[in-house]
Image (cartoon, grey):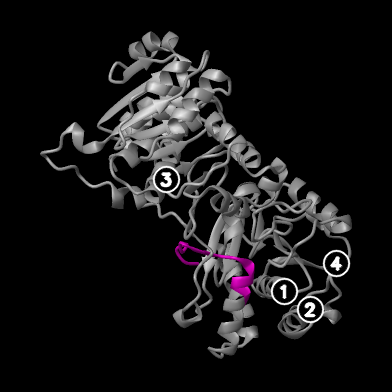
Amino acid sequence: MQTLPHALYTPAQVRELDRRAIEHEGIPGRVLMARAGRSAWQALQQRWPQPGRLLVLCGGGNNGGDGYVIARRAAEAGWSVDLWALTDPSRLEGDARRAAEAALAILTPIDDPQQALAAADGVVDALLGTGLDRPVTGRLATLIDAVNAAECPVLSVDVPSGLHAASGRVLGTAVRAAVTATFIGLKQGLFTGDAADHVGEILFDDLGVPDAVHAGMTPAAWRLPAAALADALGRRPRTAHKGAFGHVRVLGGDHGMGGAVRMAGEAAARSGAGRVSVLTRSAHVGAVLAARPELMVAGMAAAGFAEAVIAESDTVALGPGLGQAEWGRCAFDRGMQHAGALVVDADALNLLAGQPRHRDDWILTPHPGEAARLLGIDIQAVLDDRWATADALVERYGGVVVLKGAGTLIADRHRRRVVGEGNPGMASGGMGDVLTGVIAGLRAQGWAPFEAACLGVQAHARAADRAAGGGERGLLAGDVLAQLRGVINP
């Protein structure tokens, strides 16, 4: 297996790459299948090296053909192999049929895969490929649930069966793999949404196809490189001064939500902004200053926002703790008038949903619920296809969209990125406020909207991963703040 590439493709694009390899480069399909099976078998041997009892579940297409190759290799290596066929092998065609015939020359298929599960030391899932587009039901769903309930590791071939390879959503039910071995091109659905709970360790093999196969095909998206922060955030000039690193103004913090603006303000400062001001309810001024005296804090009545002076060169972070009452609406109206850099989050997004507008230079950072309100759709529609949701938000509102969640997506009209860092401990209050501050802090230092969003998401997620070293449960936004300085100085 090889280092994971950064380019991501749709399943349709990967099928096209496969076709090019066969038709343009003259690599027979059976050779590609043999290479895929061999690669997956080698991965299985490396992770579970002791010979044992292997249950191989084969479907009816080329994915099943890969499974037959694995089964034959395991049997030839002396493993005890139970082989089960979802589709009658005599009904297979082409390369898959030839792979099945080679395996069945030395193996006899079993009738009851669930009974075999009890004795299995490992399972190979080669049931469903990347073409799945409807929910898994019936006996196949029952089998997948049984596989998930069994106490043995699973290697899925190309994509865990039941997982949509384009969107990353579960279609009814899906295998929870320990390892997913995938080929030719990485599928975008393996890196966001439900996939996080199903793919396990992702291994990749390009099967030796030449670079010409990929020539001229623009990837659907890209994984953000782990080195992005280190590559972007070099050493500061020794003559640096605070005026060179921008001024962030945080607008928000209605009654009872002063902590949100404090965390957003501190996150902007910890991310390197030269100055940070907070415009909030007067009742919060003392507490914010006591917690973080480096912030400049002003108390604002609702009417005061109309006269609030915000320089065009400032970066405004609008939304943390904003609320949707009169005070929040006044702050929202003032923030929307700002012609400079603007990061919009939380209740500012909910207010924006009721007053849609379009800008090319702002950054919107919705979680799935806010995304649903912005698009006027059900939240399940967001979860069903996060990639399509991000694209739809960019189309309607413009600028850069950060769709938060497992496998956070960053998109503008021309680019899509996914960040694989982060952990479930981030599902707690205040995390979004910290992210808003980090992105605003980087934006204030001169990064363009898309780059500020990408670097901000990665810095935030990496800080959360460091903070989660003691456990994910109970992880607080303040714990992430405490790690930001180290992350932002890679």
Q: Where's residue 17, x and y in %?
A: 57, 77
Identified by mark 3, the residue type is: Ala
Tell which circle, 2 or 1, labels the residue nearer the N-terminal end.
Answer: 1
Q: Are marks 3 and 4 in contact (CB under 8 Å)?
A: no
Circle 3 residue: 453
Query: Magenta residues?
Result: 1-15
Residue 2: mark in rendering: none
The one of 320 and 466 positioned closer to us in this rendering: 320
For marks 1 and 4, the one nearer the N-term is 1
Residue 263 vertical placement versus 299 (above, below): below
* Left or right of 35, for residue 281: left
The residue type indicated by label 1 comes to Tyr
Which quadrant, please, contains the C terminus? Answer: top left
* Mark 3 Cα shell of 10 Å, populated few (<14), some (14-19), many (≥20): many
Give the spatial CA distance, label 4 vs label 2. Answer: 11 Å
The quadrant holding residue 380 is: top right
What residue is shown at x 41% (from left), y 50% (from top)? 450
Residue ID for mark 4 = 110
Q: CA distance from mark 1 to mark 4?
A: 14 Å
Q: Earlier in the sequence, mark 3 or mark 4?
A: 4
Q: Is disc 1 placed on a helix, strand or loop?
A: helix
Give above or below for 95 relative to 112.
Answer: below
The quarter holding residue 28 reads bottom right
Task: Identify the residue shown where x is 44% and y is 8%.
Answer: 283
Residue 421 versus residue 122 in the image, above or below: above
C-alpha span from label 3 to label 4: 52 Å
Does residue 9 show up magenta in the picture?
A: yes
